[in-house]
Amino acid sequence: MHYLPTRIIYGDKAVRNGFVYLNTLGKKALLVTGKNSARKCGAFDDVVNVLSGLKIEYVLFDCVCENPNLETVIQGAAIFKQNQCDFVIGIGGGSPIDAAKAIALTAANNLDIDHIYDTASFKKSYPIVAVPTTSGTGTEATQYSVLTDTALNKKAGFGHDLAFPALALVDPAYTLSLHRSVTLNTAIDALSHLLEGLYSNKRMPLLYPIIHRGVALIYQNLSLALDNLSEAKYRDALSQASLYGGITISHTSTTLQHSIGYPLTTAFNVPHGLANGIVMKQMLDLYYPYVKQELDDLFAYLGIDKNSFFAWLDSFEMRFEGALSQEFIDEKIPEVLASRNMANNPFSVSDKDIRSLFSSLI
Ligand code: NAP
Ligand code: FE
């Protein structure tokens, strides 16, 4: 089954070109952003200009930090309701957009902090608009929102069809202001989503052309983008790849690859994409016997073999800088095994698998 209810407008002036659809969503928007980058990259001004042309009012909620937490969602939902907003616009990387999704669902269903993940309580939502300013998560085309429960010190996502954005306005120009490290980490997140589209037991051949093209765009353009941060054509390639990654996981979900990364982010502040990247080779080796044909077909499409792919990954020198203890590993194994992504693996993941993945970082 192929299902993607998001209207996607991609390319130069995507926000301006989306005005016809923005006009149908209501009279007042809650704009959800992080602290600085939405303004810095020009997306905020573009959105505000279009809204004022359409006489749509807005309220700004610019309090979303990286890895948004449940308290932020509750705060945003309260502001949404106090101001009687009609829809949300998330402008930023995955963090503000995921927060915007959760705010819409929390406000629409009057959820308290203990029920934000309770998808059975999701009966309706407000329209969600996503304006991505990074090129990694693909959240503009997914039904997921990844949040951190600070009380449990745990990062986890929920997925529900009501969390698909109604509208995704994707202009790669916004990513021109990304620093080198965020460019790398977010591209590796997108790469991870694309590979997980092959690892997942929900993989589907209908998606393989998208996955192959997405991986090829990253393989051919990432180093060039990192050496030429202000070159639009490389930004365009990475934004497309990110979108393909989102479309992929909206169908296949993510896997152990993401579940391993979440504890590294909460405990050691490792950026999300990097957390995937530092175990990417180990993960590919683990999945290889189960999806050998699919991965070999991907390498054939790229015109390389698995070793060359690994050498290319090595060229980015992704490293884990923290100090992993055995206690940490013992504590996190049950958390990883209980994560909802475990249902998507083509084999039964064991304690030993997780221990050896974490141990590879010591
Ligand atoms: P992010 O956490 O949204 O942002 C990372 C940093 O980049 C922030 O400091 C942000 O600044 C800055 N930034 C964003 N856009 C910028 C721009 N155009 N120029 C300069 N700086 C910019 O990063 P992300 O990697 O996009 O999102 C990661 C989150 O998404 C994680 O929580 C991850 O788990 C989640 N995720 C969600 C999905 C999904 O399907 N829902 C999939 C994968 C990952 P500001 O704080 O000032 O904005
Ligand atoms: Fe991700």
Image (cartoon, rainbow, N blue to C red):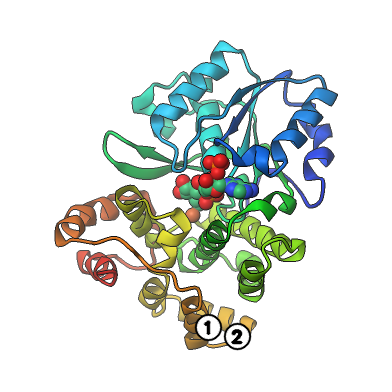
Q: Is residue 130 visible?
A: no
Which corner quadrant holds the N terminus? bottom right
- Please tell me whether residue 286 is drawn above or below residue 66 in the rendered image: below
Residue 229's image quarter? bottom right
Q: 10 Å neighbourhood of mark 2: few (<14), some, or many (≥20)?
A: few
- Please tell me whether residue 193 is drawn above or below residue 339 in the rendered image: below
Say left or right for 191 vs 318: right
Q: Provide residue 87's location: percent of width, then percent of height.
A: 65, 25
The residue located at (44%, 54%) in the rendering is 272
Looking at the picture, tell me which residue is in the foreground, 46 or 330.
Answer: 46
- Amino acid type, mark 1: Asp
Q: Provide residue 148's location: percent of width, then percent of height.
A: 38, 39
Report the disc number at residue 263: none
Say left or right for 177 vs 279: right
Q: CA distance from mark 2 to mark 1?
A: 6 Å
Say left or right for 204 vs 279: right
Q: 10 Å neighbourhood of mark 1: few (<14), some, or many (≥20)?
A: some
- Amino acid type, mark 2: Ala
Looking at the picture, tell me which residue is in the foreground, 279 or 177.
Answer: 177
Q: List the residue tagged with mark 1.
A: 296
The residue located at (41%, 78%) in the rendering is 288
The residue located at (78%, 40%) in the rendering is 15
Report the disc number at residue 300: 2
Whether the residues at callouts 2 and 1 have beta carbons within 8 Å, the answer is yes
Q: Provide residue 60's location: percent of width, then percent of height.
A: 62, 24
Q: Provide residue 270's location: percent of width, then percent of height.
A: 39, 55
Looking at the picture, tell me which residue is in the foreground, 300 or 357.
Answer: 357
